[in-house]
C-alpha cells in the first residue's frame, strides 16, 4: 500500500498514532516499558517433556543472557521433576511456552526470582501443593515479566490455606503484564505485595483476564500503581480488586457479574485508591463492614492514567471477547481492540539470504532482499516509485520472528523489530539515488532516532517520535550504498513496517532542483524563498517581539518560537544535523497576520483546570495568583486546557520551585503519556527555575495537558506552564 507523501520544510514530520491492532507476540502495558519484554525471541528453541529436563535447562541458563525459548510438551509433575518447584532464578531473556498439543503443570508451580525479560505462556498450572504452593510466583526484584494465555486454578473444596496463590508478585518486582489468563477456583487468587511493609513501585497491568469462582484477591494490590482493563469477573465470593497501602489503580471497561465487593480497600491500616471508568455491574452486591467499597455509584478516589498506549474493547463485548480468548489452548488468540478476535500468524519460514555478497561492513548478519512489486507514484506529484522495493536490507538484530526485508517489501502490516529497544539499526542498501525517505512505525515506541549515511556516518536527519508516518524530505540527492535508521531510544523494541525511498522532482540542493539550499547565503531554507535569512551559526539573530525562527541547513531544520532575538547556536536549537554550517531564518508573517505570542497558563486563570492539592501564595517569586502545590503522593498532578487552531508540535516550559530534592514528572497530552520531565531541586522554595523545553503534539481543537508526579513526594510548586508554537488560546475546562 502506498500513501501520499506530505511535503514539509522540516526534515521530519512527526505524527503520533496508535496502532489499530496490537500483535500477540509483544505485551501491552507495563511490560512494554523499561526496554520492553521479548523473552527468548531471536534465540534458540528447545523442547522439554519432563520437569527434570525443564529444571536443568533453566539451571544451566542462569547468568547466560543469550535468548532462549523453551517449549514444554506434556505433563510436568513433582515426581518427574525431582524438585518442589520450577525455579527461574537469576535468569534473563527466556520464554517458557506450552506446545500446541498442551502443557500441564500438575501439582508443581513456577517461581521467578531475580528474573528479567521472561515470558510465560500457554500453560495449565493447577493444584500446586508443593514448594511455595503458588501456581506462578514472582519476586526478588524481577522485572519485565509477561504472563500470558495461561490457565491457573486450585480448589475451593479444601481449606483456604491448603494452596496459596495462583499468581503472586512480591519484593520489588515491577514492569509486569498479566494478560489473557483464566484464573479460577481459588481462595486467594492473586496477591501483589506480600505484606503492608512490602513497599515497591510495583507497576502491573491486568487485561483480558477471566476471573471466575474465586474467593478474593482478584487482585490484592499494595503500594505502586496498576491498570486493570477489559477483564471479566464471574462469581467473586468475598472481594475482588482490593487496593491497599496507597496503591493507585485505574480500573476501566471491566465486566463484573454475580460478584460481591468488586472494588474495595480492606484489611490494611492505609487504604488504597482507584480511578474507575466505564465498568459494568451485573448482579453485584456490597458489604462495607471491612472497609471502603466503591459501591454502585463506582465513585473514583483518585485520578490516574498509565504511561503507555492501549486500546479498549467496548464494554458490551468484554465478556464474550474474554471468554473466547483467555486461557491456555486458545491458540494465543487476542482481541484487536474493536471486539474482534485475532489469530496470530503462523511461524514465518526461515528467511532466504540475499544471493549477493554480504555487506563487508556488517559481515555478521545475513540480509533480506526487498521484494519487487508494481510500485505506484505515492503522491502523484512527481515523487516517483519507491526505490527501496528493489534494494536489499540488513540490520543490527531481529526479534519476534521479524525480518530485515519486511521494511522494504511494500507490505505495511509486516515489520522489522529488533531484539532490544536501544542501540539498534535497520538499513536499506544497493538502491538508486534518492532525496526523500518515508518511515512507517506500527507501535509508536521510538523516542529518539537518526537517519545516517551508513558508510560515512553523516547524519541526514534526526528526531524523537516516528509515529505512523515520518517524512524526511528536502535532502540533497543521496547516491550512497546504504542508508541506516538508527534507534537511539525507545520505550519498547520498535516495529518498523516500511522504510521507503523516493527521488522527488525537487530536492533540497540536488541535481534536480534550481533552488539550492545555500546555508550561508541570503536564500531561505525552502524553495519558496519566503523565510528571511537572519544570521549565520554562532551569530545573533536580532528581531523584536515573538517570532518563529528556523535553524539548520541542507533540508534539515528545526523551528522554535522565541522572543526578542536569539543566539544562532546548537545549544539553543538542539543541533538538528552535524558537520555542516547552519544558519537562522525568520519564518514569514503573512500580511495582516499577528505574530502568535506564547501562551502562559497561570493558576486560577483561564486554562487552569485542577491541582491534586491547593493553590498557595506562601513562598514569594511566583508570577500570577500563586503556585500549584500538589499533595505529596505518587501520581498527583495538575491539569490545563488549551485550544490549538491546527494540529502540530508545540513546546512547553514549566516554571517551578523545588526545595532540596528532585521531583520528576510525566507529561500527558489528552490522557496519553508523552515523556518524562526532569524537575530538579532548586535549593529554596523561593528559587524558581524553568524546565528544559518539552515538545508535544497537540490535536486541532481542545487539548488537555497534564503533569503527574512519578515520585512519592508529588510535584514541585508549579508557577506556570508556557506553551508556544502559535495559534493557541486558553479554554475553560470541561
Image (cartoon, rainbow, N blue to C red):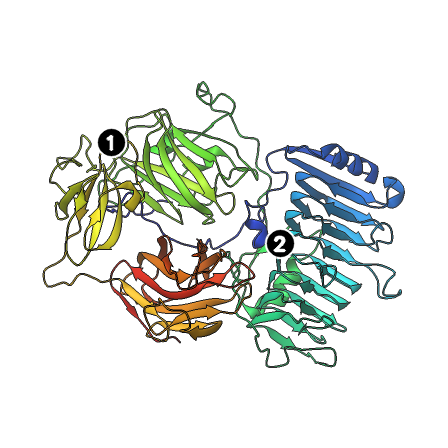
In the picture provided, is 489 more to the left or to the right than 261?
Answer: left
Point out the image quarter for the C terminus: bottom left
Residue ID at (73%, 72%): 239
Secondary structure category for the residue under label 1: loop
Q: CA distance from mark 2 to mark 1?
A: 46 Å
In the picture provided, is 692 more to the left or to the right than 320?
Answer: left
Location of residue 518 with respect to 588 vertically, above or below: above
Residue 145 versus residue 272: which sits nearer the camera?
Answer: 272
Point out the image quarter for the N terminus: top left
Location of residue 231 with respect to 9 vertically, above or below: below
Numbered circle sitting on residue 477: 1
In the picture provided, is 247 more to the left or to the right than 592?
Answer: right
Tell me if mark 2 has few (under 14), some (14-19) or many (20+) residues whose alpha carbon lies within 10 angstroms of its own. many
Location of residue 147 with respect to 236 vertically, above or below: above
Tell me if mark 1 has few (under 14), some (14-19) or many (20+) residues whose alpha carbon lies within 10 angstroms of its own. many
Q: Quarter-wise, where is residue 389 in the image? A: top left
The percent coordinates of residue 467 (x first, y second) are 40, 49
Amino acid at each position: 500500500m502506498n500513501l501520499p507523501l506530505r511535503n514539509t520544510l522540516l526534515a521530519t514530520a512527526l505524527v503520533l498514532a496508535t496502532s489499530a491492532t496490537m500483535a500477540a507476540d509483544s505485551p501491552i502495558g507495563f511490560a512494554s516499558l523499561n526496554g520492553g519484554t521479548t523473552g527468548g525471541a531471536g534465540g534458540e528453541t528447545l523442547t522439554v517433556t519432563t520437569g527434570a529436563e525443564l529444571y536443568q535447562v533453566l539451571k544451566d541458563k542462569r547468568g547466560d543472557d543469550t535468548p532462549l525459548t523453551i517449549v514444554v510438551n506434556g505433563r510436568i509433575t513433582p515426581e518427574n521433576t525431582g524438585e518442589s518447584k520450577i525455579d527461574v532464578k537469576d535468569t534473563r531473556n527466556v520464554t517458557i511456552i506450552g506446545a500446541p498439543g498442551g502443557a500441564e503443570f500438575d501439582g508443581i508451580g513456577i517461581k521467578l526470582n531475580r528474573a528479567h525479560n521472561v515470558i510465560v505462556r500457554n500453560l495449565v498450572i493447577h493444584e500446586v501443593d508443593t514448594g511455595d504452593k503458588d501456581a506462578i510466583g514472582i519476586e526478588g526484584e524481577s522485572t519485565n515479566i509477561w504472563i500470558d494465555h495461561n490457565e491457573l486454578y486450585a480448589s475451593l473444596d479444601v481449606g483456604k490455606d491448603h494452596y496459596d496463590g495462583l499468581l503472586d508478585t512480591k519484593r520489588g518486582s515491577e514492569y509486569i503484564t498479566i494478560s489473557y489468563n483464566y484464573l479460577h477456583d481459588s481462595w486467594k487468587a492473586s496477591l501483589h505485595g506480600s505484606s503492608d511493609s512490602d513497599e515497591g513501585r510495583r507497576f502491573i497491568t491486568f487485561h483480558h483476564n477471566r476471573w471466575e469462582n474465586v474467593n478474593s484477591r482478584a487482585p490484592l494490590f499494595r503500594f505502586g500503581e496498576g491498570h486493570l482493563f477489559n477483564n471479566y469477573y464471574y462469581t467473586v465470593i468475598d472481594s475482588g480488586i482490593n487496593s491497599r497501602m496507597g496503591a493507585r489503580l485505574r480500573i476501566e471497561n471491566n465486566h463484573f457479574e454475580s460478584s460481591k465487593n468488586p472494588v474495595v480497600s480492606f484489611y490494611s491500616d492505609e487504604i488504597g485508591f482507584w480511578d474507575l471508568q466505564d465498568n459494568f455491574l451485573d448482579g453485584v452486591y456490597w458489604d462495607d463492614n471491612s472497609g471502603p467499597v466503591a459501591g454502585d455509584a463506582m465513585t473514583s478516589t483518585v485520578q490516574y492514567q498509565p504511561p503507555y498506549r492501549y486500546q479498549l474493547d467496548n464494554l458490551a463485548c468484554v465478556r464474550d471477547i474474554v471468554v473466547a480468548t483467555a486461557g491456555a489452548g486458545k491458540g494465543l488468540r487476542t482481541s484487536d481492540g474493536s471486539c474482534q478476535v485475532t489469530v496470530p500468524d503462523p511461524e514465518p519460514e526461515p528467511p532466504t539470504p540475499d544471493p549477493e555478497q554480504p555487506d563487508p561492513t556488517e559481515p555478521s548478519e545475513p540480509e533480506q532482499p526487498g521484494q519487487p512489486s508494481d510500485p505506484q507514484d505515492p503522491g502523484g506529484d512527481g515523487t516517483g516509485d519507491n526505490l527501496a522495493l528493489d534494494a536489499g536490507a540488513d540490520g543490527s538484530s531481529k526479534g519476534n520472528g521479524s525480518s530485515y526485508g519486511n521494511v522494504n517489501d511494500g507490505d505495511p502490516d509486516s515489520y522489522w523489530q529488533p531484539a532490544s529497544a536501544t542501540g539498534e539499526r535497520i538499513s536499506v542498501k544497493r538502491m538508486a539515488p534518492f532525496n526523500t525517505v518515508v518511515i512507517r512505525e506500527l507501535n509508536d515506541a521510538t523516542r529518539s532516532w537518526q537517519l545516517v549515511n551508513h558508510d560515512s556516518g553523516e547524519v541526514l536527519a534526526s528526531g524523537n517520535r516516528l509515529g505512523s508516518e515520518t517524512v524526511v524530505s528536502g535532502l540533497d540527492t543521496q547516491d550512497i550504498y546504504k542508508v541506516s535508521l538508527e534507534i537511539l531510544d525507545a520505550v519498547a523494541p520498535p516495529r518498523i513496517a516500511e522504510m521507503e525511498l523516493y527521488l522527488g522532482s525537487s530536492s533540497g540542493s540536488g541535481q534536480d532542483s534550481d533552488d539550492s539550499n545555500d546555508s550561508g547565503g541570503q536564500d531561505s531554507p525552502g524553495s519558496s524563498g519566503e523565510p528571511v535569512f537572519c544570521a549565520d551559526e554562532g551569530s545573533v539573530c536580532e528581531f523584536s517581539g515573538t517570532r518563529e525562527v528556523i535553524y539548520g541547513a541542507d533540508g534539515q531544520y528545526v523551528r522554535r518560537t522565541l522572543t526578542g532575538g536569539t543566539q544562532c547556536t546548537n545549544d539553543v536549537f538542539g543541533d538538528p544535523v552535524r558537520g555542516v554550517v547552519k544558519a537562522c531564518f525568520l519564518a514569514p508573517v503573512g500580511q495582516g497576520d499577528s505574530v502568535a505570542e506564547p501562551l502562559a497558563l497561570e493558576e486560577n486563570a483561564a486554562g487552569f483546570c485542577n491541582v491534586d492539592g491547593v493553590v498557595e501564595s506562601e513562598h514569594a517569586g511566583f508570577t500570577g495568583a500563586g503556585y500549584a502545590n500538589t499533595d505529596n503522593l505518587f501520581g498527583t498532578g495538575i491539569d490545563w486546557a488549551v485550544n490549538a487552531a491546527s494540529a502540530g508540535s508545540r513546546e512547553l516550559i514549566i516554571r517551578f520551585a523545588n526545595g532540596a530534592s528532585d521531583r520528576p514528572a510525566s507529561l500527558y497530552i489528552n490522557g496519553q503519556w508523552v515523556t518524562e520531565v526532569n524537575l530538579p531541586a532548586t535549593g529554596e522554595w523561593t528559587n524558581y527555575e524553568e524546565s528544559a523545553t518539552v515538545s508535544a503534539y497537540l490535536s486541532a481543537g481542545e487539548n488537555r495537558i497534564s503533569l503527574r508526579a512519578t515520585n512519592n513526594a508529588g510535584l514541585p510548586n508549579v508557577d506556570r506552564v508556557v506553551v508556544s508554537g502559535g495559534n493557541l488560546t486558553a479554554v475553560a475546562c470541561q
